[in-house]
Amino acid sequence: MTIASILIFAAIYGDTPDMKHAWAVHDINRPKPAKVEVNSKGVPSDAIVLFDGTKESFEKNWRDDKGNASKWSYSKDGYFFTVPGWNNGGNIFTREEFGDCQLHVEFRHDPSNIITDQGAQMRGNSGVFLMNNYEIQVLESYYTSKDAEGTSQYVNNYADGQAGSVYAENPPMVNPAKKPGEWQVYDIVFHQPVWKGGKLVHPGSITVFFNGVLVQDHWEMEGLTTHCVRRPLKEHVTKGPLVFQDHGCIVQFRNIWYRPLPSRWANLTHSNLSACPEKVMELRRETAAKLFAKIKDPKKASADNIKALAEVISYANEGEYAASFWCALEAYRAKKGSEQEVKSVNAALGVLIRNKIIPESAKIK
Ligand code: MG
């Protein structure tokens, strides 16, 4: 029998639900994920687009720090960019506020607009500030890698301040920066810190793919972004704007979208990390009730009935469900079916025995 045919015929198959898992392994009753299509620009259908290249999108979704129209400039070529001069435009904020997310941002440095005589931190400096608190540095960093040391183009910058760094905390693992003039991509997975009763229970994390290369691997934040000093994490509201920094340098941005993500700690019904046993049991009972309601005659001594009832008690081995299972099983044991049928019943019972829901002696000999 192939694995596929076992799946079709076996009511229960993988290890059963437990106090941390509301679903069995390979559970056919487990809700299926929603369909997401990705369009020709790479934008998933469930993404919230913050800038699609149009002026309307720029004006609708972005603001200054006071909520007024941003002073940043829009280009008909489908990007927006900082106003020349130190802090002339101020930071730019999304009107949308959000927390945990998958974020896509593209940025570019115009080679003719890179400041080269004011130090490495003025070479196209901006920044992607998640929730206005945690910065992924944006900087022209092509010539910053250690491989370029000793060459005439080498730019000596501190590692925790180059492109792809969690600014002032963690350098990118490698430097996949492209040359000025080329569009570059950040794909970020962000989970904000979790606080309970004023206590930090998880520091949150940042994962960054820079031009498709992993540079931040689930970095757990140490603090709120700042300069020079270490500033510890501090509890804040759970939604905030996405902010791009005005650091007095010209940087261009396009194709910006995000997908809200559930907190890694929000899964209360199926997770070794955060599942709540009461919530797990609630969902298991709900599933058991749905499956039991589909059984026409719970006491009938048929193989199909026993397999269906075995599935029910794998979720909730109690009350009417357990009574019906044992009643049907004992009646079937006296009657017995064909060898093939008994084999299939024993396969279902075997899963329950393996998971210590019923004793070994329940097997039909
Ligand atoms: Mg910056």
Image: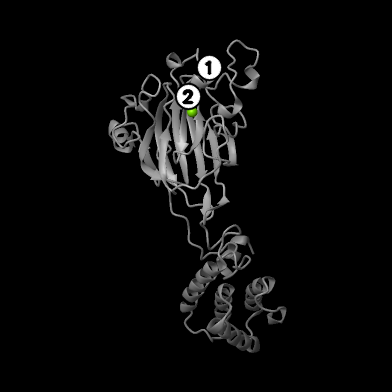
Task: Please state which of residues 160 and 231 is positioned toward the viewer in this rendering.
Answer: 231
**Mark 2 and mark 1: Cα distance apart in space:** 11 Å
Classify mark 1: helix, strand or loop: loop
What residue did someone put label 1 on? 119
Tell me: 58 left or right of 240: left
What is the number of the mark on residue 276? Answer: none
Task: Please state which of residues 69 and 275 is positioned toward the viewer in this rendering.
Answer: 69
Residue 86 vertical position relative to residue 16 in the rendered view, above or below: above
What is the number of the mark on residue 125? Answer: 2
Say if residue 362 shows up in the picture: yes
Mark 2 sits near ligand 1, with its Cβ under 8 Å away: yes
Q: Percent position (x, y) of residue 248?
A: 42, 22
Classify mark 2: helix, strand or loop: loop
* Numbered disc in front, either 2 or 1: 1
Q: Residue at x 43, y 37 (%)?
A: 42
Say if residue 41 shows up in the picture: no
Colour theme: one colour
Q: Residue at x 42, y 47 (%)?
A: 239
Q: Percent position (x, y) of residue 213?
A: 57, 33
Task: Please state which of residues 301 and 136 is positioned toward the viewer in this rendering.
Answer: 136
Q: Percent position (x, y) of residue 1?
A: 64, 64
Mark 1 sits near ligand 1, with its Cβ under 8 Å away: no
